[in-house]
Image (cartoon, rainbow, N blue to C red):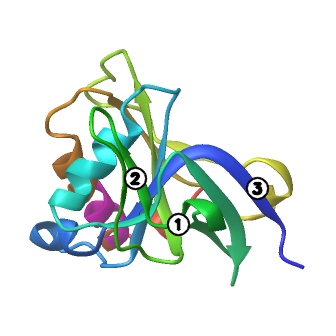
Amino acid sequence: MMETVNIHASCVSLDDAGKAFGAVRNCGILILGESGAGKSALVLQLLAAGATLVADDRTELFVKTHALQARAPRNLRGLLEIRGAGIVKLSFRASVRVAMAVRLTAKKPPRMPERTFYAPPGGLSRVAPVPLLAMKSNDIAAAAKLAAAASAFANNGFLDNAP
């Protein structure tokens, strides 16, 4: 049986949201942050730009073909919470390879941060870590920044060359 770890995070597949930057379509972005940090709001921005929902608020991580993968728990598939409107049902991707992660913070990240990586918890630590960015939770350019970064990392081999 495949080991899974259920974490407090959201996830999207970049798909058409990264088209302007030449990003790989099925590039998974894991969105981490405390409750109320803006994970669902960032997911909504990415969906509006052409991404596809994978999971909102709870994400199951697992390893398949030596790569970190993400999916929604069965009872949450296709559900997205829109603060002020409630929970809506949307089309979704069953799973995606996680290519990068972003941690939403209240503080503005440094302009030129050091390269950092997200290592999944539990028994999934045997998989290579993925690039991790820090982003201010209310950054109006967050969706575009993530699409551009995902494209740059993928096109420059950064995704496959973790330390």
Q: CA distance from mark 1 to mark 3?
A: 16 Å
Q: Residue furthest top?
A: 107
Residues in magenta? 149-154
Residue at image mark 2: 80
Residue at image mark 1: 77
Q: As drawn, is 48 to the left or to the right of 81? A: left
Q: As drawn, is 125 to the left or to the right of 57? A: right
Mark 1: amino acid: Arg
* Vertical placement of residue 55 versus 45, above or below: below
1 or 3: mark nearer the eye? 1
User: Dot 1, crowdedness within 10 Å: few (<14), some or many (≥20)?
Assistant: many
Q: Nearer the viewer, residue 80 or 113?
A: 80
Location of residue 17 in the rendering, given as x and y in whole percent from the top left corner: 19, 66
Q: Quadrant of the N terminus?
A: bottom right
In the rendered image, residue 79 lying in the magenta stretch gets the answer no
Residue at image mark 3: 5
